[in-house]
Amino acid sequence: MGSQVKLTELVRGLKLSVRSADGDLEREVTGGYASDLLSDVLANSEPGNLWITLQIHKNIVAVASMKDLAGIILVNGREPEQDTIEKAEAENIAIMVTEMPTFELVGRLYGLGITGTK
């Protein structure tokens, strides 16, 4: 596993826009997981992972909460639906957005020491 990085460092370093739970950005990221299939994330992500996806509906918050993920980054400039933001605030799940595509974002996260190794 790579070195642990806090969400605040990622927001600042990658110029991410925070959409929910901005008070919980001191959470440490233990690794990363990129997938758009909720069942895949449920089966294979680890607690503390940062989830990279293009899904914007509220079910992403349920998955992140169940798996105790550090946060969610939405790619390609996608914006979470309003009920997703509300649920994320209630569950204290940080949702961030970026204009970057998944491939570029994952490369940058890897460069910062965040790996997908279990």
Image (tube, rainbow, N blue to C red):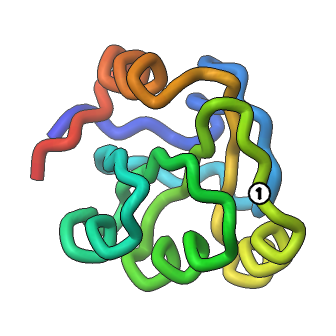
Can you give x and y, in whole percent of width and height, for residue 96 in the image? 69, 45
Q: Residue at x 29, y 46 (%)?
A: 31
Helix, strand or loop status at disc 1:
loop
Residue that carries the numbered disc 1 in the rendered image: 80
Residue 14 lies in what quarter of the image?
top right
**Left or right of 75: which side holds 83?**
right
Amino acid type, residue under disc 1 in the picture: Pro
Query: Does residue 40 show up?
Result: yes
Percent across and percent down for residue 39 are 31, 75
Q: Quadrant of residue 44?
A: bottom left
| Quadrant of the rendering where the N terminus is positioned | top left
Question: Considering depth in this image, is 46 or 57 the residue closer to the camera?
Answer: 57
The image quadrant of residue 41 is bottom left
Q: In the image, what residue occupies the spot 21% across and 74% down?
A: 43
Q: Residue 113 location in percent, x, y?
A: 30, 25
Q: Is residue 26 left or right of residue 31?
A: right
Nearest the eye: 76 or 65: 76
For the residue carrying disc 1, how many other residues have a C-alpha within 10 Å: few (<14), some (14-19), or many (20+)? Answer: many
Looking at the image, the residue that sits furthest to the left is 118
Which residue is at the front of the view, 24 or 103? 103
19 sits to left or right of 7: right
Q: How many marks?
A: 1
Residue at the image position 57 percent from the left and 42 percent from the top = 7
The residue lying at 31 percent from left, 33 percent from top is 114
Question: Is residue 12 in sight in this rendering?
Answer: no
In the image, is residue 60 above or below residue 59? above
Residue 48 in the image: x percent, y percent?
Answer: 37, 60
Q: Is residue 74 above or below residue 114?
A: below
* Above or below, comparing residue 64 to residue 54 in the picture: below
Q: Is residue 70 above or below residue 77?
A: below
